[in-house]
Image (cartoon, grey):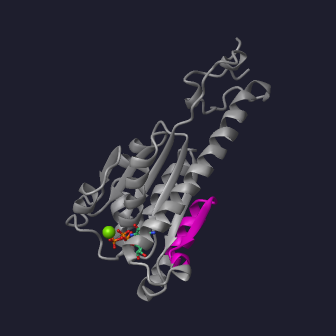
Amino acid sequence: MANDFDNEDTVIEPRVAVVGIGGAGCNVVNSVYWDFASADTIAINTDRAALEAISADKKLFICRNVTKGQGTGGDALLGRRCAQAHMDDISDALEGHDIVFIVAGMGGGTGTGAAPVVAEIAQRMNLITFSIAINPFSFESARGRAAKGGMNQLRAVCSMTVSVENDLILQNRPDMALKDAYRAVNRSIISFIKRQKARTVEAFIEQLRHLDSIIVDPGIPVSTRALGGNVMTD
Ligand SMILES: Nc1nc2c(ncn2[C@@H]2O[C@H](COP(=O)(O)OP(=O)(O)OP(=O)(O)O)[C@@H](O)[C@H]2O)c(=O)[nH]1
Ligand SMILES: [Mg+2]
């Protein structure tokens, strides 16, 4: 049976999700939501009010029986437990996507604790997963050690993890207000996501185009979500 790629007009669009975790991650997702339409946005937080204040295609309030909905107060173990208590909701939200960008600020409790859990779920679902970890300003010295721990955990589960330094923005503009500094860093994260998304989508489509020339063992499942159909395996 000929596959869909015999027809050059076939449109293949892998589905992309940007997942923000905790305050910083959700702020980035909010900007992505208003900035470009070609990615689904998923916001995850233990803080109900913060989640309500932002826009996203899907919001996951992860606090069931763990916090009172007011964040973790910087407790990364609590953030991890919250994500673990909602693993099914997280995989349901990721379902149907092919490429995922996970964004979280390190040093607080939710992003630091929950982002590695989300990255692990995405990897287990065989999604192409990028993690973007925002390192706190060095003046937030108490958060440095927790941030390092979160970053190491993220790297251990997701090889495509990049770190973004909040500090860098203040090197050129030391008197910038914190709010503006956050915005500037978030803008550069969004540019990175756009560029990386374009590259990854292109590579993804190219690989799918050549699927018919790849010998696949019968019985080995091949992800064909983006095809919207089945690929023959013999
Ligand atoms: N670039 C950027 N950094 C941010 C932003 N908001 C917070 N941060 C940084 O991210 C770190 C973690 O903060 P949050 O994301 O608010 O923490 P959280 O994950 O919500 O954790 P808890 O509130 O403790 O549960 C902070 O120490 C800041 O340095 C933002 O909008 N942009
Ligand atoms: Mg928070």
The residue that appears at 34% across and 77% down in the rendered structure is: 74
> Is 148 left, or right, of 77 in this rendering?
right
The residue that appears at 46% across and 56% down in the rendered structure is: 118
Please tell me whether residue 219 is drawn above or below residue 109 in the rendered image.
above
Q: Which residues are magenta?
A: 148-169
Which residue is situated farthest in the left direction here? 68
Please tell me whether residue 164 is drawn above or below residue 27 in the rendered image.
below
Please tell me whether residue 182 is drawn above or below residue 172 in the rendered image.
above
Pinpoint residue 206: horizontal percent, then vertical percent: 72, 34
Pinpoint residue 178: horizontal percent, then vertical percent: 39, 77
The residue that appears at 57% across and 30% down in the rendered structure is: 226
Q: Is residue 21 visible?
A: yes
Q: Is residue 217 visible?
A: no
Instruction: Give the camera-side residue of 171 and 8.
Output: 171
Q: Name the quarter showing ligand 1.
A: bottom left
Which quadrant holds the C terminus?
A: top right
Answer whether residue 159 is magenta in the image: yes
Please tell me whether residue 160 is drawn above or below residue 122 in the rendered image.
below
Pinpoint residue 45: horizontal percent, then vertical percent: 32, 60
The number of numbered discs placed on residues in the rendered structure image is: 0
Which quadrant holds the N terminus?
A: top right
Q: Quadrant of residue 152?
A: bottom right
> Is 67 left, or right, of 140 in this rendering?
left
Pinpoint residue 86: horizontal percent, then vertical percent: 34, 53
Answer whether residue 153 is magenta in the image: yes
Instruction: Give the camera-side residue of 64 and 96.
Output: 96
